[in-house]
Image (tube, grey):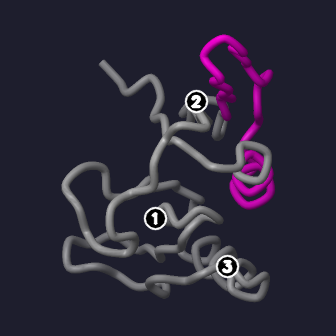
């Protein structure tokens, strides 16, 4: 078994598509729209395998107390291949004004990673 895809609600579908395309070379599929339900989504493929579904619906509320930890999904981890790639991408993102939550480091459980926030505040772990 494998995870087929992960889905997240977004406020601005096009901005989020552009972010994942630019920084993680995600390849977007067609945008799906259901006008009756006021629902729009797009699947993005990363490295030809993993998929991320970005979904928008105008009636989705913000997370309670933004910035505080809550039960549920914590982050999306994207492998970029090497320590050098983690370092380089993190530096490029910081220079572009993207919020860096945790600079590149080796964690206690042995992962080499950095953590950033996407344009809507979702945590993205950049790892080997």
Q: Which residue is mark 2?
A: 49
Q: Crowdedness of circle 3 by 10 Å Cα count: few (<14), some, many (20+)? A: some
For marks 1 and 3 on the same chain, the one whose residue lies earlier in the sequence: 3
Q: Which residue is mark 3?
A: 98
Using residue 104 as the reference point, say whether residue 35 is left or right of it: right
For marks 1 and 2 on the same chain, the one whose residue lies earlier in the sequence: 2
Residue found at x 59% / y 33%:
57
Q: Nearer the viewer, mark 1 or mark 2?
A: 1
Q: Quick check: marks 1 and 3 in contact, CB under 8 Å?
A: no
Circle 2 SS class: loop
For marks 2 and 3 on the same chain, the one whose residue lies earlier in the sequence: 2
Residue found at x 66% / y 33%:
45
Q: Which residue is mark 1?
A: 123
* 53 is higher (above) or lower (below) than 22: above
- Give how far apart the Cα atoms at labels 1 and 3 are: 12 Å
Q: Quadrant of the N terminus?
A: top left
Using residue 99 as the reference point, say whether residue 103 is left or right of it: left
The residues colored magenta run 17-44
- Give how far apart the Cα atoms at labels 1 and 2 are: 21 Å
């Amino acid at each position: 078994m494998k995870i087929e895809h992960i889905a997240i609600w977004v406020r601005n579908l096009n901005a989020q598509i552009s972010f994942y395309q630019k920084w993680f070379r995600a390849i977007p599929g067609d945008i799906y729209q259901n006008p009756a339900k006021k629902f729009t989504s797009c699947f993005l493929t990363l490295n030809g395998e993993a998929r991320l579904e970005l979904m928008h619906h105008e009636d989705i509320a913000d997370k309670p107390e933004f910035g505080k930890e809550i039960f549920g999904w914590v982050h999306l981890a994207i492998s970029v291949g090497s320590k050098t790639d983690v370092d380089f991408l993190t530096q490029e993102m910081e220079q572009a004004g993207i919020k860096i939550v945790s600079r590149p480091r080796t964690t206690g459980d042995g992962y080499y990673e950095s953590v950033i926030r996407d344009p809507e505040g979702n945590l993205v772990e950049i790892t080997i």
